[in-house]
Image (tube, grey):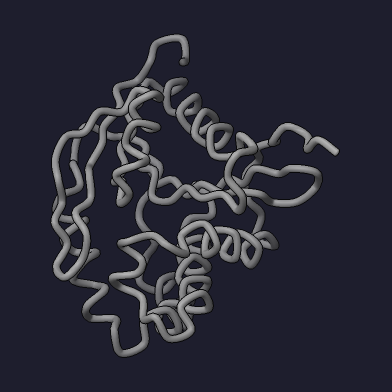
């Protein structure tokens, strides 16, 4: 039976566990994640990491639902929304510790390099994470179009880092262009990409 078209909605607090598992499946072979997350209990650690990211991004988390099930998710950093405060981060820090354990300092070094390369202006939508459980159903495209339409409606550009070279042409089809390379310590080289807003949508 043919699957229905993806329906995109904002994630609920009750979706966090499912979102984390879907993203962990999507990023199982991701070169950046493989460089910062221990191979021991890798999938479980990755699930904890994405639970942490989703909990800290309640206003910027969207899911795509297919046949009643969450089939993909996108986590966006939104302009004008301050980053999580100390107490919010501390409250969910157990997920971060489960993800990295004693490897946390190494992971933080990579995150610092990414943060230092992040453009500070103009205000923009930041695609932190986008992943789907099973490719080929239009889920990733639906999530990306939805987020970019929201950014366009606000007249805002968008930014992302791609850890997989094969994804660069896909993002280019949506209007992104490579701007620089980000070399991670003991990890892969990421490609930073920028998209100017499209008047009247895509």
Q: Nearer the viewer, residue 112 or 135?
A: 135
Q: Nearer the viewer, residue 41 or 151?
A: 41
As drawn, is 16 to the left or to the right of 39? right
Task: List the single residue furthest toward the right.
Answer: 1
Residue at 19% from the left image edge and 36% from the top image edge: 121
- Residue 3: x and y, percent? 78, 38
Residue 109, compared with residue 101, is above or below; it is: above
Residue at 70% from the left image edge and 36% from the top image edge: 7
Q: Quadrant of the N terminus?
A: top right
Task: List the single residue furthest toward the bottom.
Answer: 102
Circle count: 0
Residue at 29% from the left image edge and 81% from the top image edge: 104
Task: List the single residue furthest toward the top.
Answer: 200
- Residue 169: x and y, percent? 34, 31
As drawn, is 3 to the left or to the right of 187? right
Residue 91, compared with residue 119, is above or below; it is: below
């Amino acid at each position: 039976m043919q699957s229905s078209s993806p329906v995109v909605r904002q994630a609920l607090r009750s979706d966090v566990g499912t979102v984390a598992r879907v993203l962990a499946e999507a990023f199982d072979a991701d070169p950046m994640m493989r460089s910062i997350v221990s191979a021991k209990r890798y999938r479980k650690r990755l699930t904890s990491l994405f639970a942490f990211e989703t909990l800290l991004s309640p206003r910027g988390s969207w899911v795509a639902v297919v046949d009643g099930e969450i089939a993909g998710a996108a986590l966006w950093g939104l302009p004008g929304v301050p980053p999580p405060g100390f107490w919010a981060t501390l409250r969910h820090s157990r997920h971060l510790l489960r993800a990295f354990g004693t490897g946390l300092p190494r992971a933080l070094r990579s995150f610092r390099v990414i943060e230092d390369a992040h453009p500070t202006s103009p205000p923009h939508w930041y695609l932190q994470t986008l992943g789907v459980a099973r490719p080929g159903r239009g889920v990733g495209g639906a999530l990306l179009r939805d987020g970019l339409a929201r950014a366009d409606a606000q007249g805002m550009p968008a930014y992302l880092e791609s850890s997989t070279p094969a994804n660069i042409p896909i993002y280019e089809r949506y209007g992104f262009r490579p701007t620089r390379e980000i070399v991670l310590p003991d990890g892969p080289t990421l490609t930073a990409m920028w998209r100017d807003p499209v008047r009247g949508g895509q």
